[in-house]
Amino acid sequence: YSLLSGVEFEKYMKDIFEALAYEVSRTQVVGDQGADLILRMGSEKTVVQIKNLSSRVSNKAVQEIVAAKRFYGA
């Protein structure tokens, strides 16, 4: 998967979540509050930040998705 760009990887993950029966929407590339995908299944809403890394996720990325959870009401 490392050959995919960030946007390509997001699209790939969107397809996977849709195959798992989630309703998936992609956020804007800029101003997304740290979320890349919004997943819905029934009344449950989940925000996802996509990273295609071979290293650990940064603390900043964790802080962003926590903020996105509140922003999107997930």
Image: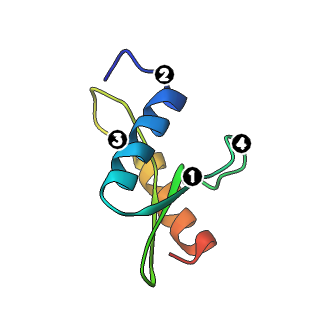
Residue named by callout 1? 34
Q: Nearer the viewer, residue 42 or 35?
A: 42
Mark 1 or mark 3, which is nearer the start of the sequence?
A: 1
Q: Is residue 70 above or below residue 26?
A: below
Residue named by callout 2? 5
Corner quadrant of residue 12: top left
Identify the mark at residue 49; answer none if there is no mark. Answer: none
Q: Position of residue 52 (x, y in %)?
A: 37, 31
Residue named by callout 3? 57
Mark 1 or mark 2, which is nearer the start of the sequence?
A: 2
Give the number of the mark in front: 4 or 2. Answer: 2
Q: Position of residue 39 (x, y in %)?
A: 46, 64
Give the number of the mark in front: 2 or 1. Answer: 2
Q: Amino acid at mark 3?
A: Val
Corner quadrant of residue 70: bottom right
> How far apart are labels 3 and 1 at the CA level?
13 Å
